Image: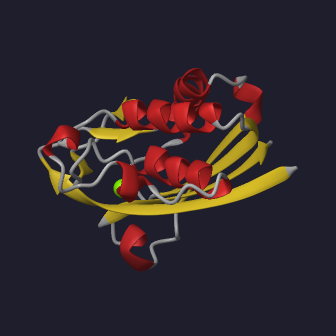
Amino acid sequence: MMRIGHGFDVHRFTEGRPLILGGVEIPHHQGLLAHSDGDVLIHALCDALLGAAGLGDIGSYFPDSDAEFAGIDSRILLRRVMALLKERQYAISNADLTLVAQVPRLAPHIDAMKACLAGDMEIPEARIGIKATTTEGLGFSGRKEGIAAYAVVLLNE
Ligand code: MG
């Protein structure tokens, strides 16, 4: 049986933090505000994976009220989500991810993100799609207030 999952996340820009997307630090004068490292792409991906498996959402496993997760590398969260899927013998068919950001330009970093995520999910890079788009200046993303991410995954059970 195939199981589809969808995830969505948003974080706002703030001063004084590194910008981490898909496990990659991207040169920019602002980072994303969050209890964790603010990796909005990995958060959307985790929610898609958990959703496909019927396991709830990232907030129920890694609550932002828990000091254990303060500033945590979101790749650790992704690996923990993968362990939950493995226990239940789910295998990833593919993942398709979209980043929505007016700034910075993300295209040069897509390959590095793919390599990171493929490593953490233990699947070939060819099974991961990552796209980046602007919103032509419209909305919160267009006003450079933050970054959104969407994720869709297909699991085989
Ligand atoms: Mg988040």
Residue 73 image-quadrant placement? top left
Q: Position of residue 118 (x, y in %)?
A: 62, 26
Q: Nearer the viewer, residue 38 or 68?
A: 68
Does residue 105 show up? no
Q: Quick check: 18 left or right of 106? A: left
Q: In the image, is residue 42 above or below residue 27?
A: below
Q: Residue at x 88, y 49 (%)?
A: 1
Residue 70 image-quadrant placement? top left
Q: Position of residue 22 (x, y in %)?
A: 47, 37
Q: Nearer the viewer, residue 112 or 104?
A: 112
Farthest bottom residue in view: 139
Q: Quick check: 80 left or right of 31? A: right
Q: Quadrant of ligand 1?
A: bottom left
Q: In the image, is residue 54 above or below residue 25?
A: below
Q: Residue at x 45, y 33 (%)?
A: 80
Residue 124 image-quadrant placement? top right
Q: Position of residue 111 (x, y in %)?
A: 59, 28
Count all numbered tags in the image, as a single digit. 0
